Image (cartoon, rainbow, N blue to C red):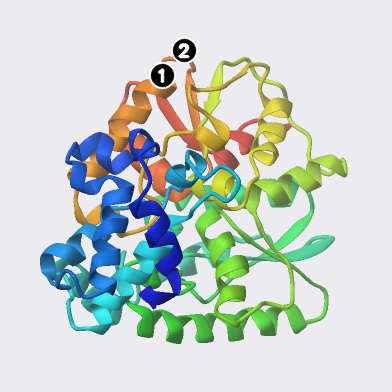
């Protein structure tokens, strides 16, 4: 596990903390121990037996949002270091050695009892499955992930409206988790079992007659089903795409059109969308066709500050996610936008809670569905 990341840990340990200013955990926490390089230093010391792996050291490994901003600002310009997978491996190492944080144990127990770390979302999934458009020129499978169903299910219903307009039939997956959600908090064995189960459903989908792509409203899911599944030896035999990329493709083919509305609106980039999948263009192409004034926050796109941890690890320290949302909301509101648009359930949920009645927050699918011709 951790030994596979020894080189990254060595390099991050000896750098000069150039990336520290970008780390959202440090921005909120302000302890130098949560610098990316210091987390790497502790993980390296644990790997070499210089520090014990206990509750204190293990907790430090969870102080990461996986936003990849440290990679974006890495001092090793020709070979940027990616610390997030190393810290994920450190969390798995801790669990494997029996060092399980109480919060992680609680999430594991909830997953076992209710099916997902977000609780039982079967009812909502089944309700949406009944509403999905059944006929069309092609059929896609929406990966109905638990995070979206728990935190941004309204986006799924909006996607249905867009699918009907483009004559796309939709089915919802029975799988609610990719496994990556649990791997991210160190539960490697449970993640492996889920990955095997989910992959079997998706392989069956791709082998069925007329099957289109798997589409997700959560960029983390797209990353998990493509890159992570491939890295773990479970590559899928068909395409997986974000809702934004899929809808942009339909628009390019002339199958989706929007009534132009006055802005300004601003888009909140998902870390997984822009720094893992490297797609900042699809949502902007769609928004440019639906709104006459699309603002850019400072910073934005590949350098955008996250509005929330896209995953469960950093949520173990509740003050960090709350501070991230408030801070990013202020940056987004500085644009003067009347509408903030997101494309992942974590940012949507966090910004909506932070914004209250001050400014409207909508998922990309919701914003676009409002601009469909009558």
Which residue is the extreme one toward the right?
Answer: 253
Q: Splitting the image into 4 quarters, where does residue 181 fall?
A: bottom left
Mark 1 and mark 2 residues within 8 Å of each other at the beta carbon: yes
Q: Position of residue 92 (x, y in %)?
A: 32, 75
Residue holding disc 1: 333
- Mark 2 residue element: loop
Nearer-the-camera pick, 199 or 164: 199
Q: Give the Cα separation between the discs numbered 1 and 2.
A: 5 Å
Relative depth, front residue between 76 and 140? 76
Residue at the image position 33 percent from the left and 21 percent from the top? 358
Q: Is residue 343 left or right of residue 331?
A: right
Residue shown at 37% from the left, 80% from the top: 188
From the top left corner, tell me how far across and down residue 245 is, in percent: 70, 48
Label 1 neighbour load within 10 Å: few <14, some 14-19, many 20+: some
Please state, as top left, top right, bottom left or bottom right, where the C terminus lies in the image: top right
Please state the horizontal and vertical placement of residue 22, each as a whole percent of the image: 38, 35
203 left or right of 217 in image: right
**Of 116 and 99, which appears nearest the observer?**
99
Left or right side of 293 for 356: left
Q: Which residue is mark 2?
A: 336
Q: Is residue 225 visible?
A: yes
Q: Quadrant of the N terminus?
A: bottom left
- Image-quadrant location for residue 56: bottom left
Q: Position of residue 61 (x, y in %)?
A: 26, 61
């Amino acid at each position: 596990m951790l030994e596979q990341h020894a080189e990254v840990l060595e390099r991050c340990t000896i750098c000069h903390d150039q990336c520290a200013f970008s780390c959202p955990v440090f921005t909120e926490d302000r302890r130098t121990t949560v610098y990316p390089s210091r987390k790497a230093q502790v993980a390296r010391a644990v790997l070499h037996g210089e520090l014990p792996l206990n509750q204190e050291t293990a907790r430090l490994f969870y102080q990461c949002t996986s936003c990849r901003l440290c990679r974006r600002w890495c001092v090793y310009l020709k070979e940027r270091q990616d610390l997030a997978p190393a810290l994920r491996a450190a969390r798995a190492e801790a669990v494997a050695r029996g060092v399980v944080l109480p919060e992680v144990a609680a999430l594991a127990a909830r997953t076992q009892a209710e099916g997902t770390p977000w609780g039982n979302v079967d009812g909502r999934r089944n309700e949406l499955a009944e509403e999905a458009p059944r006929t069309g020129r092609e059929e896609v499978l929406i990966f109905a992930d638990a995070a979206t169903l728990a935190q941004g299910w309204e986006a799924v219903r909006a996607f249905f409206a867009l699918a009907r307009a483009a004559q796309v039939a939709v089915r919802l997956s029975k799988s609610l988790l990719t496994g990556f959600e649990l791997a991210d908090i160190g539960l490697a064995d449970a993640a492996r079992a889920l990955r095997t189960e989910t992959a079997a459903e998706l392989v069956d989908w791709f082998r069925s007659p007329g099957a289109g792509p798997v589409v997700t409203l959560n960029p983390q899911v797209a990353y998990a089903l493509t890159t992570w599944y491939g890295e773990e030896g479970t590559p899928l035999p068909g395409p997986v795409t974000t809702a934004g990329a899929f809808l942009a493709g339909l628009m390019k083919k002339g199958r989706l059109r929007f009534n132009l509305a006055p802005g300004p609106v601003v888009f909140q980039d998902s870390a997984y969308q822009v720094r893992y999948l490297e797609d900042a263009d699809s949502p902007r192409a769609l928004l440019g066709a639906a709104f006459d004034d699309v603002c850019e926050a400072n910073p934005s796109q590949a350098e955008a500050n996250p509005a929330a941890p896209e995953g469960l690890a950093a949520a173990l320290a509740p003050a960090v996610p709350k501070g991230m949302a408030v801070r990013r909301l202020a940056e987004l509101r500085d644009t003067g936008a009347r509408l903030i648009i997101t494309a992942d359930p974590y940012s949507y949920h966090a910004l909506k809670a932070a914004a209250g009645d001050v400014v409207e927050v909508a998922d990309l699918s919701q914003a676009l569905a409002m601009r469909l011709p009558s």
